[in-house]
Image (cartoon, rainbow, N blue to C red):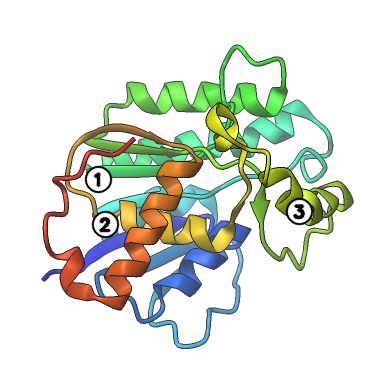
Amino acid sequence: MSRRRILLVGATGLIGRAAMAQAVGYEPVRLAAVARRRIELPAGAQMEMFVAGPEHWAEIIDAMQPDAVVCALGTTWRKAGRDEAGFRAVDEALVLDVARAAKDAGIRQFICVSAVGASRQSRNLYLRVKGEVEDALQKMRFTRLDILRPSLLRGHRPDDLRLGERLAILASPLFDLFMHGGYRRYHSISARRMAQAILDLAQEKAGGRFVHDYDSLMRAARRFERDRDDPTQGARGRGQRTLA
């Protein structure tokens, strides 16, 4: 079975680091990553890490020719200096630059981390930008486009101390108990589970546009764990599943 080549853009973030950790020893995929600064790779990782400015990312994508590009780029309102232009420079412009580079290079699949509630009609700037980016990605017509819409992300951010988010993470087990029915999409999810879902979805062969909320992400994460524990399971029927 040939290994799927995946290029991760946004390796220094919470999800990017988790994806690199989950890929260690996982034979179905060959993960590479690109980042603007050097970071320590997970123990046991055997992967390529490209350290380059965004102006060189298109060259890397074209030269590598991965089967899928995963975009886990994102900033925060505080990191952007509480400035809309600064926020859009990363969460909109940089994300779309990566997508256009992937499309121009003929990459079949693009996976983008968005957010639950993303809509270009939202009054919330964060969700409005995410919705605008989703719409722009759809117009690029990738053979396969996967939009991931997590709610609150749980995980350790050693270089990003956000008190409000930390308190929300601490309270999330209680709030999650009340997330039923249509509210399940607001269920918190760990960076580890997000990483597992990404590595699973990057192996799909069916074309189309797929939007993944909490339940879909968790199904993909469980498939990843099943395939990791029994590799013969992943070789049967992949690409024939219908995803939410």
* Location of residue 23 in the rendering, given as x and y in whole percent from the top left corner: 40, 72
Image height of 114 relative to 125, above or below:
below
- Residue 208 in view (yes/no): yes
Q: Which mark is residue 136?
A: none
Quadrant assignment for the N terminus: bottom left
Relative placement, left or right, of 63 versus 147 is: left
* Location of residue 2 in the rendering, given as x and y in whole percent from the top left corner: 13, 69
- Residue found at the far right of this picture: 163
* Location of residue 175 in the rendering, given as x and y in whole percent from the top left corner: 73, 44
Q: Amino acid at mark 3?
A: Ile
Q: Are marks 2 and 3 in contact (CB under 8 Å)?
A: no
Of the numbered discs 1 and 2, the one sitting upstream in the chain is: 2
Marks 1 and 3, how far apart in space?
36 Å
Q: Residue at x 43, y 23 (%)?
A: 136
**Dot 2: element:** loop
Of the numbered discs 2 and 3, the one sitting upstream in the chain is: 2
Q: Amino acid at mark 2?
A: Pro
Q: Which residue is mark 3?
A: 169
* Viewer-side residue, 133 vs 93: 133
Marks 1 and 2, how far apart in space?
7 Å
* Viewer-side residue, 125 vs 154: 154
The crowd level at tag 3 (other Cα within 10 Å; few <14, some 14-19, many 20+) is some
Report how many numbered discs are placed on residues in the image.
3
Relative placement, left or right, of 178 versus 92 is: right
Q: Which residue is mark 2?
A: 66
Q: Residue at x 12, y 55 (%)?
A: 237
Q: Which residue is mark 1?
A: 107
Quadrant assignment for the C terminus: top left
Relative placement, left or right, of 241 versus 115 is: left
Q: Are marks 1 and 2 in contact (CB under 8 Å)?
A: yes
- Residue found at the far top of this picture: 121
